[in-house]
Image (spheres, rainbow, N blue to C red):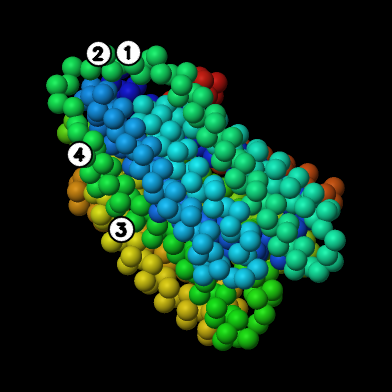
Amino acid sequence: MSKKGSSDNFIKQAGFLAVAGILSRIIGLLYRSPLTAIIGDEGNAYYSTAYTIYVIILLVSSYSIPSAISKIISQRLVLGEYNNAHRIFKCALIYVFVVGGIASISAFILAPLLVEHNSVEVFRLFTPTIFLSGFLGVLRGYFQAHRTMLQTSISQILEQILNAVVSILAAYFLLSSLSSSDPTIRAITGAKGSALGTGVGVLIALIFMGFLYFLNRPIIKKRRKRDSCVKTLSYSKVFLIILSMVTPIILSTFIYNFSTSLNQTIYIKIMMHFHHLTEKVVSTGYGVFASKAVTLSNVPIAIASAVSASIIPAISASYTTKNYKEANQKIQLAMKTTMLISIPSAVGLFVFAKPILILLFPQKATIQLATMLLQWLSITVIFYAISTLSNAILQGIGKVNIPVINAIIALFVQTLVLVIVVIYGTNPILGLVWAAITYSFLMCILNGVAIKKYLHYKQDYLKTFIMPGVCATLMGLVAYLFYIGMMALIKNSTISLFLGIIVAILIYAVLLLATRTLQKQELEKLPFGRKLSKWIKL
């Protein structure tokens, strides 16, 4: 493969992860609707409360492992140190065994202190998954370091499919066998079924990745035999490398995601003790925010997450070999690709918020609230996409402490915003939205300053942000008017929505090409881009 091809390959690999991420989140959206019909908004609330804390613990124990391991191993691979790369892999497995085991046992014991009473049993069902997720993370990071994302992509889809199927079936059968008619007890029981689905999904994905690793063992052994590196890292040195890389990334990701858990706790406590509302009422409102609005807004962010996972080993390899020009080219391509998708996604969510929610979550009592929250949260799609990618860039060039500092600053400011709006605002639940906007925006600014400082990087703002924004705005206006017209004509929201989305995609593509916001050479670097450029005769 040519140097140029190698340089651009990470975008194609990101395409695999992006497709898998979007499919996984779409599956997640589709199964939440029948699951909500079974367990209700109250059950969703208890599941969301437990799941949020579970994710925080997962961040500390294993969630950041793929990024850290892919960076460390890719540095060794680019230098041809295959034995050292394999030793890092083995030590990473030991690391997650110890850390994951401690985290899992501690979470089970401390459950009553971590979540509200009605979510304790649900949360405890997540604890075995904490242990298994570490091993899954190491295997995914190992394959990502080799710049092949197909294995991770397939495992993500398998994980989500099993999660969906088991969650629905477990919730249904648990409730069917329950004799109690108490709505809260039934909600808790249904939420436990959903938690079981999460665990089964991770277990199946782990089995799949383990199977692929054993299939590749002959290739791994051949590479290790060809290793000409005379200096083999000691186990103590490897663990030191892992800790020095994993710890800052964990802290950064922890703080980056801790805002969700912190906001949940602050919101629920203030609403219960300051506004004197019951746990059931507050949890139901929060459930609408977390399980509907946030879940939908997270779908397009899968693109940024995929590009971030791909760019860490790619940037790390360029930076290790001191090829700074290539590193900047990769950043430019990654940022523009992310924005070309994230900006119209944000506009689409704003325009089609209500029909999407009607399709996926038809509970009439909360549809207006969910629509308002989703429209506001659509703004964060762009900010979170930029901040997720910029975090990965800084980690890729070894500046792993900077995202930690930036995250602490952003967390402090967004907490002040949340408290003020929840206590004094006329609509307290908007405090959660404004906190998310504040946090993601500050991370964009602070990370951007750091990247410019250390890489002397300059972004093409016109072609990366402004023109995609103009094209997406026009797209949204025309698509919404088309949707309104179709509704008046056929009076079917689902058909009108799907036709409106198709029209939006076509209009946006035409506008990008007509304004030359997307050039031929850029299109060819995208997955299936060469075929598309020939088809449209660019």
Name the amino acid, label 4: Lys
- State the separation of the CA atoms marked 4 and 3: 24 Å
What residue is shown with label 1? Answer: 222
Disc 4: CA contacts within 10 A as few (<14), some (14-19) or many (>=20): few
Name the amino acid, label 1: Lys
Picture residue at 63% right of the left edge, 59% below the top? 122
Where 388 falls versus 255 (above or below)?
A: above
What residue is shown with label 4? Answer: 237
Disc 1: CA contacts within 10 A as few (<14), some (14-19) or many (>=20): few
Task: Work out whether mark 2 precedes mark 3 in sequence or the reverse, and give the earlier one.
Answer: 2
Name the amino acid, label 3: Val
Disc 2 element: loop
- State the separation of the CA atoms marked 1 and 3: 39 Å
What residue is shown with label 3? Answer: 404
Where 264 falls versus 63 (above or below)?
A: below
Disc 2: CA contacts within 10 A as few (<14), some (14-19) or many (>=20): few
Task: Work out whether mark 4 precedes mark 3 in sequence or the reverse, and give the earlier one.
Answer: 4
Mark linked to residue 226: 2
